[in-house]
Amino acid sequence: MDKVTGKQLAVTQTIHAYQLDGKGGILPITDKTEGTAAQPCWLHLDYEQPESMAWLNNTELLPDSFKEALSGESCRPRVSRQGDGTLIILRSINLNSESIPDPLVTLRVFITDNLIVSTRHRPVQAIDDVVAELGKNAGPTHSGDWLVDILDSLTDQVSDFIDDIHGQVIELEDGLLDRAVPGRGVIALIRKQLIVLRRHLMPQRDVFSRLASERLPWMSNDDRHRMQDIAERLGRGLDDLDATIARTAVIVDEINALLADAMNRRTYTMSLMAMLFLPATFLTGLFGVNLGGIPGGDKHGAFTIFCICLVSVVAGILWWFKRRKWL
């Protein structure tokens, strides 16, 4: 790639603009800055900012075919190469306050041996983690090291998020043992997050594996080995994700069984009550007609005797239910 100078990287609106010093720290980008393989320059931009968008569209440091992707027109994980540059689309766990509707955010990276341009709209925690390490002079030293550190942090967040969801599923399973049915929409939200994660993390694992296998000039053998370890770690996380999705299906079946059992119990109780009062209803209806000749109509104690007969009938039905083990 052609030489990268500080004047070419002059953007008025940047989130981060640094030059890696090759020792784990950072240097400010000035007009005299020159990006090299030993000390690459890094711009981190919000593509929704007008000045950042204008720089992305007008700069000659980026291939035209990659500018649209860096401007937010692509979100599925993928890796593309053109010349010395590589475009990488990544998905990260959304740790922002509005994370429930969308559990993932997108990070887009264009990387060469002497230039790194990353873009996002919503904050990405992995970027903040790497900046914090650079501030302590314990960060990446070159482009490949920077990418591996970013992907390592992304995968850690994915693993933590999957563990958190797995813990929620275990709590739901324990609750079902006590016949506690979760609120409406709880399982649906968990399953939606799991499915979205799986949909985007499956191709992201393939991106990691491809980066580990390709002979990119700005990645050392140590970077490739670390990248392969990250890909395998993400693969294990996806296995846990599949297992958790299967467990939510079992939970839904158990919830349906509990609800059906509760409904059957209510229906059974109502049927018994109807059978219990059916003879009494028949007798009261029969003796309640306003016609002459009703037995006991002219006797003072007939009503008491009738009530005793009704109680006896109900008691007899209850005894029969118990003998048949219906109660």
Image (cartoon, rainbow, N blue to C red):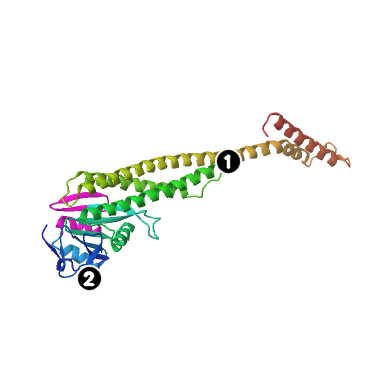
Rounded to the nearest angstrom, the CA distance separating label 2 from label 1 is: 64 Å
Residue sitting at 81 percent across and 36 percent down?
309
Q: Earlier in the sequence, mark 2 or mark 1?
A: 2
Q: Secondary structure at mark 1?
A: helix
Residue 160, can we see it?
A: yes
Q: Position of residue 149 (x, y in %)?
A: 28, 54
**Which numbered disc, 2 or 1, marks the residue closer to the eye?**
2
Q: Which residues are magenta?
A: 62-87
Q: Position of residue 141 (x, y in %)?
A: 23, 57
- Locate the N terminus and report the quarter of the image it occupies: bottom left
Horizontal placement of 187 versus 108: left or right? Answer: right
Q: Nearer the viewer, residue 265 or 238?
A: 238
Q: Nearer the viewer, residue 65 or 212?
A: 212
Disc 1 residue type?
Ala
**Which label belongs to residue 262?**
1
Which residue does the numbered mark 2 point to in the structure image? 12
